[in-house]
Image: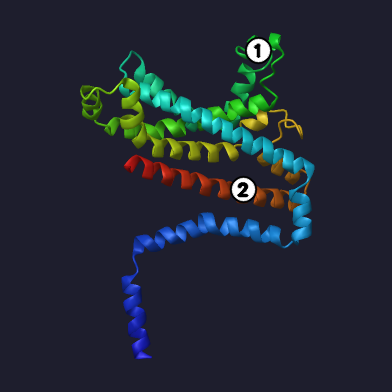
Amino acid sequence: MEVNTNQISKFISKISIPWTITIGYLTIILLVPMAALILKSSTLGFGKFWEIATSDVAISAYQVTFITAIFAGLINGLMGTLLAWVLVRYDFPGRKIFDAMIDIPFALPTAVAGLVLATVYSPTGWIGQFFTPFGIKIAFSQLGVFVAMLFISLPFVVRTLQPVLQEMERETEEASWALGATDWQTFRLVILPPLIPPILTGVALGFSRAVGEYGSIVVIASNIPFQDLIAPVLVFQRLEEYDYVGATVIGAVLLLISLVLLLVINFLQKWGSNYAEN
């Protein structure tokens, strides 16, 4: 018994307090809720789970959610890179104001963002009125969902990329030009490789944020099944109908698909890091 006590004491003394706090916090905040969601939905049986998860309304909601989020992430990957480049490499009047504006989606309540976007992009809004004559409806359609996802996910790419651009040494670019490389060759071979990992990281973060968005989209979309209904709104609709089983199943599917896509994105990030190092 004395030996066991000494062994336990030595084991406890080797445990890192920061490590223990970190693991405990992640377990309580992330692992337990996700496990509870999956376990709750698994009690229904595979047949019932599959029936609810693959209903026509659910499939349509998955498609609208993930396809729109992927396109929003890709567009923001391009435009966010351009914005970060201009904010870091160019000095112009009002640059600090524009830089601060990037964080507006973080600070603005999502419901307020949806209200503003719905007003601006409505058929009679400041921007939407220019598309109405061409039969293009932005607000209260899937285009509105796309615009809302663009709005709330833009800062992730910019803020992830800015520190990398600020730390890049201009001497390497000048050396490339001195050796006779063109601007395109310098960008492709010198500048772009170290930027690929942060770009992919920003796209992954923006995609995850877009998939889970609810507040702004529920305002700017019509939330009609088979048109612009997204999975998070469908979960809320099921809860309003007291269909807790359906809400749990759709939430579990949403969680599983998100985890798979994030694993794929992490693989791409690792590939980008290896590409940059080579």
Q: Quadrant of the C terminus?
A: top left
Q: Residue furthest front?
A: 180
User: What residue is at 45 percent from the left and 38 percent from the top?
Assistant: 200
Q: Position of residue 24 (x, y in %)?
A: 45, 61
Observer-nearest of 37 and 2: 37
Location of mark 1 (residue): 131
Of labels 1 and 2, earlier in sequence is: 1
Q: Is residue 232 above or below residue 124?
A: below
Residue 9, located in which quarter of the rendered image?
bottom left
Q: Position of residue 87 (x, y in %)?
A: 36, 22
Using residue 104 as the reference point, say whether residue 191 is left or right of it: left
Residue occupying the point 57% across, 49% down = 260
The residue type indicated by label 1 comes to Phe
Q: Position of residue 85 (x, y in %)?
A: 36, 24
Disc 1 crowd rating (10 Å Cα; few below 14, some 14-19, many 20+) is: some
Could you tell me which secondary element the residue under label 1 belongs to? Answer: loop
Query: Quick one: which residue is furthest to the bottom in this view?
Result: 1
Q: Is residue 271 left or right of residue 45?
A: left
Where residue 239 appears, as percent x and y from the top left, is 73, 46
| Residue 204 as seen in the image, left or right of residue 56 | left
Instruction: Please name whichever residue, 156 or 11, is drawn nearer the observer in this view of the structure.
Output: 156
Kindly tell me whether residue 100 is visible in this rendering: no
Q: Quadrant of residue 102?
A: top left
Q: Residue at x 21, y 25 (%)?
A: 179
Q: Secondary structure at mark 2?
A: helix
Number of marks: 2
Q: Nearer the viewer, residue 126 or 115?
A: 126
Residue position for label 2: 257
**If the image is split into quadrants, where does the N terminus sit?**
bottom left
Mark 2: few/some/many CA within 10 Å (<14, 14-19, 20+): few
Real-space Cα distance between discs 1 and 2? 34 Å
